[in-house]
Amino acid sequence: MKRVLTVQDISCVGKCSLGVALPIISAAGAEAAVLPTAVLSVHTAFTHVYKRDLSEDMEAIFASWEQEKIAFDFVYTGYLASPEQTGTVSRFLDRLPGGNKTVFVDPVMGDFGRLYTGFHATFPGYMADLCARADVIVPNLTEACALLNEPYREDFTRDQLTDLLRRLCAMGAKCAVLTGVSPVGDADKLGVLKYDGRDGSVFSYYGERVRTSQPLHGTGDVFASACVGALAAGMCLDDALSLAVEFTSRSAACWAAAADRRWYGVDFETALPYYIDEIRSYTKKI
């Protein structure tokens, strides 16, 4: 059984971050370990948020692991609460035992052309240093533009998006994946575009876009967690990305169809049996 370390915050209420990473990675048949970066009473789309930065606790937790000689097969980072935490995670990567671990970075910083509240304009530079150490990075368009200091816009062509990904790989990441993008001329589809910096290959996969009158919260965390879980189950990256897109789309569709839906996160729980079945089907073949 593969052991996945996920490094991100925990929102006590709100379907995001560790609240989705733990069940999804576990459902894929991997052991999920956590290094919490912050505790939030609710996620940041709520009005009244209590937040506690856990930077000092992260050091103590990692020191305990070092004494116990605990190793990880995958390290998956999400929301980091400060520029200092990007450096902390980088130092941890150097100190973790084992040389074959896969580093998967979701550079959670913003969306819709803006950084999230609390992030200074200099934060993407710190995140870029962490991304340079990754095997796979999965920014959305806002985050990709921020990492490259590129003006945000929504009318990039496929070739231009591919060039953004190529430039991200040139900064150090082995593979760069742009999430939440549509094929040109088909806004009813939503998915990913991947560039492999090792051989220059390009891959894309699109699922059905779920149209709603309300914003969909937590879809990025659902996608990234599903992708990491699939990788831990033995899938190649292209298959893992495809499954993650489909699972995220189904989670959104389940949310849209539910009479008692909660506004603060998609219904990944109802879609989880589909994900488990796909993982099991794949593992039976290998």
Image: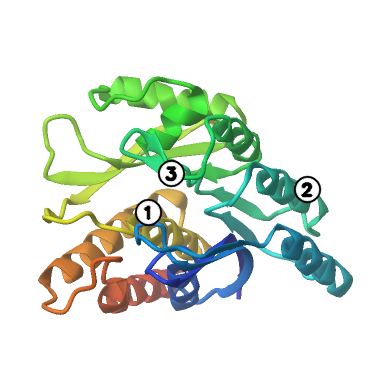
User: Regarding mark 2 in the picture, which secondary structure is present there?
Assistant: helix
Q: CA distance from mark 3 to mark 1?
A: 14 Å
The quarter holding residue 268 reads bottom left
Q: CA distance from mark 3 to mark 2?
A: 25 Å
In the picture shown, does residue 253 fall above or below 159?
Answer: below
Q: Which residue is mark 1?
A: 220
Q: Which sits earlier in the primary sequence, circle 3 or circle 1?
A: 3
x and y percent of residue 199 in the render? 51, 29
Q: Residues within 10 Å of mark 2 (few under 14, many from 20)?
A: few
- Say which amino acid is labelled 2: Arg
In the picture shown, does residue 201 fall above or below 251?
Answer: above
Q: Is residue 286 left or right of residue 122?
A: left
Q: Is residue 37 left or right of residue 185?
A: right
Check whether the beta carbons of the residues at disc 3 and disc 2 lie within 8 A of each other.
no
User: Regarding mark 3 in the picture, which secondary structure is present there?
Assistant: loop
- Say which amino acid is labelled 3: Tyr
User: Regarding mark 1 in the picture, which secondary structure is present there?
Assistant: helix
x and y percent of residue 282 in the render? 39, 69
Residue 194 visible in the current orientation: no
Residue 91: mark: 2
Mark 3 against mark 1, which lies toward the viewer?
3
Q: Which residue appears at 18% of the width and 71% of the height?
A: 254
Nearer the observer, 106 or 121: 121
Residue 174 visible in the current orientation: yes
Nearer the observer, 26 or 267: 267
Q: Which sits earlier in the primary sequence, circle 1 or circle 2?
A: 2
Q: Which residue is mark 3?
A: 116
Nearer the observer, 234 or 180: 180
- Say which amino acid is labelled 1: Gly
**Furthest residue toward right:** 67
